[in-house]
Image (tube, rainbow, N blue to C red):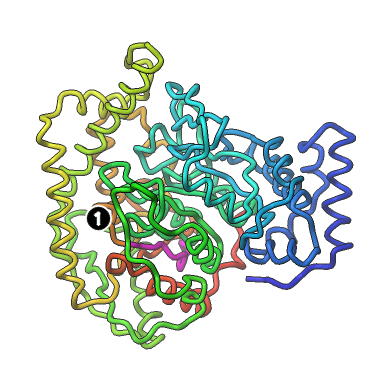
């Protein structure tokens, strides 16, 4: 990652003058043709914030460059759910808090997170008029960190699938290959970061929705422990927020800026003893890693994903860590039973609550077929099934905690396949087909939402062109490797992630879009 300062005059020659041209000629679309984004994209978030603190560039100049880049690539990728450019300009033009990311442009995922005066549309037409009366607690922390929010990113309807395709906002495309998925449900955020619009974007993860888009888009994505951040608790505590980033240190510094219990929150995690940013710069002690034996799975893992896991294990071994093949004592059928029951009940409750508030009925026309199936399941399900699913969460967490008494980290592929073709898991598919496909494609990530453990996807592999069961896989697609730690131990994840980033840097890889 390049962090050195650029010459202010040279930066302004490409950015500020283009801003003036854009204002004279009608806005950001004209500026998209004028601004060179190469130097902007060479920096991570902390690097850009350092430019602002050093007087090398202003927050407004950074924002206009980000808007220009968004306008340039969004037509091809479709990651913007809401353009809040005027809000961003108003924020950038005021004095900002002296936070670690003061002046950095930032995008929120358009799901659950509340930004005062703006809709939280949940990827669904039904929620188009759900306008937040005030900022949520995590948004307040983002603003305190100095971030300049200028839009919201796309997500599938209610975040219930792992691709970002929506009847409301359309198809979000992968910058590495526009016929492939970005992953979901934070696919809009991942596309924006991968395409160089900005170095950090908000994401959330209820079954893999930070780690899966990070894997599909060649980014670093860490799901924190349950209760680490405010605003969690959805899907019986399975859903948590954080960010997708290009650099490990950005993710660490953002967690430093936002972590801590929410007043009145149901969940909490042990507070860190040192900053996560310092952990990211510190090599870990020799670790004992349980590398998942993917050959033990009922469904096969794509050769590229198996190779990514093998190569990551070999790299860790070369770095001095102890690697053992192992498989956690988890009943996969219980996973398939429990999380869908919770999603179904909470989906039906959310739609019914908003229907009651707006005094309207809920019909099949209000949502996509898979969401409608979840909604109907949630209304018909035995009330005891929700409690039973939570008990299953607890049992799985206890079993995995005992397993990890002998290991520091558990390592697996993030997904069982590389980024798959668009349409594979869209919400207009028959429900039974959707359930069977998602179980085959993503058998790994949801486990750690159930247990509450932190887990990260690290971009350590790109495809060479091997085939798969979903059609031929072209070369050059990113494939993530997932590392999970004991509950509350993000520190070890950041230590290893920083070590891996130094040993096998990925920042120089850029997608064609």
Left or right of 310 in this view: 201 = right
Locate residue 416, reporting x and y percent.
32, 56
Residue at image location 18% in from the left, 51% down from the top? 393
User: According to the image, label 1 marks what residue?
Assistant: 447
**Magenta-colored stretch includes residue 218:** no
Vertically, is 252 above or below 158? below
The residue at the far front in this view is: 263
Residue at image location 41% in from the left, 54% down from the top? 229
Q: Nearer the viewer, residue 293 or 88?
A: 88
Q: Nearer the viewer, residue 52 or 211?
A: 52
Q: In which quadrant will I find the N terminus?
A: bottom right
Locate residue 199, reporting x and y percent.
61, 57
Residue at image location 48% in from the left, 81% down from the top? 282
Q: Which contiguous range is marked in magenta? A: 454-463
Residue at image location 23% in from the left, 23% down from the top? 376
Q: Quadrant of residue 156?
A: top left
Q: Badge 1, how many Cα within 10 Å: few under 14, some, many 20+?
A: many
Q: Nearer the viewer, residue 344 or 387?
A: 387
Left or right of 513 in this view: 170 = left
Locate residue 146, reporting x and y percent.
63, 54
Disc 1 on helix, strand or loop?
helix
Q: Quadrant of residue 347?
A: top left
């Amino acid at each position: 990652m390049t962090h050195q300062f650029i010459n202010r005059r040279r930066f302004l020659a490409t950015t500020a003058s283009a801003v003036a041209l854009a204002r004279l000629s009608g806005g950001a679309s004209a500026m998209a043709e004028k601004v060179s984004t190469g130097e902007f994209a060479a920096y991570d978030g902390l690097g850009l914030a350092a430019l602002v603190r050093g007087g090398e560039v202003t927050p407004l100049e950074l924002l206009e460059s980000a808007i220009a880049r968004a306008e340039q690539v969004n037509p091809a990728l479709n990651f913007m759910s809401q353009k809040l450019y005027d809000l961003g300009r108003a924020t950038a033009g005021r004095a900002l808090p002296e936070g670690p990311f003061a002046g950095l442009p930032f995008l929120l995922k358009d799901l659950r997170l509340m930004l005062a005066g703006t809709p939280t549309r949940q990827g669904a037409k039904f929620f188009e008029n759900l306008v937040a009366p005030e900022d949520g607690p995590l948004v307040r922390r983002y603003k305190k960190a100095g971030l300049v929010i200028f839009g919201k990113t796309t997500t599938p309807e209610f975040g219930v699938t792992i691709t970002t395709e929506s009847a409301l906002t359309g198809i979000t495309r992968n910058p590495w290959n526009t016929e492939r998925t970005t992953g979901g449900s934070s696919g809009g955020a991942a596309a924006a970061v991968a395409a160089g619009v900005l170095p950090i974007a908000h994401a959330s993860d209820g079954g893999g929705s930070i780690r899966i888009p990070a894997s599909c888009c060649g980014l670093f994505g860490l799901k924190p422990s349950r209760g680490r951040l405010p605003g969690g608790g959805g899907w019986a505590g399975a859903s948590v927020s954080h960010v997708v980033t290009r650099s490990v240190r950005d993710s660490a510094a953002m967690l430093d800026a936002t972590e801590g219990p929410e007043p009145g929150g149901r969940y909490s995690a042990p507070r860190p003893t040192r900053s996560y940013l310092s952990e990211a710069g510190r090599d870990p002690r020799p670790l004992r890693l349980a590398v998942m034996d993917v050959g033990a799975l009922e469904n096969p893992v794509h050769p590229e994903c198996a190779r990514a896991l093998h190569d990551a294990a070999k790299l860790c071994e070369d770095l001095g860590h102890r690697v053992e093949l192992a498989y956690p004592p988890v009943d996969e059928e219980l996973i398939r039973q429990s999380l869908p029951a919770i999603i179904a009940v909470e989906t039906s409750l959310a739609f019914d609550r908003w229907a009651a508030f707006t005094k309207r009925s809920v019909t099949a026309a209000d949502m996509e077929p898979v969401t409608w199936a979840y909604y109907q399941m949630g209304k018909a399900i035995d009330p005891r099934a929700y409690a039973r699913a939570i008990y299953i969460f607890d049992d799985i967490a206890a079993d995995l905690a005992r397993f990890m008494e002998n290991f520091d980290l558990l390592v697996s592929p993030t997904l069982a396949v590389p980024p798959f073709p668009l349409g594979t898991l869209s919400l207009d598919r028959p429900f039974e087909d959707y359930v069977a496909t998602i179980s085959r494609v993503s058998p790994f990530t949801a486990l750690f939402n159930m247990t509450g453990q932190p887990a990260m996807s690290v971009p350590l592999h790109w495809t060479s062109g091997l085939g798969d069961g979903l059609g031929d896989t072209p070369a050059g697609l990113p494939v993530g490797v997932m590392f999970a730690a004991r509950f509350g131990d993000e520190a070890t994840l950041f230590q290893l992630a920083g070590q891996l980033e130094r040993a096998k840097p990925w920042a120089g890889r850029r997608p064609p879009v």
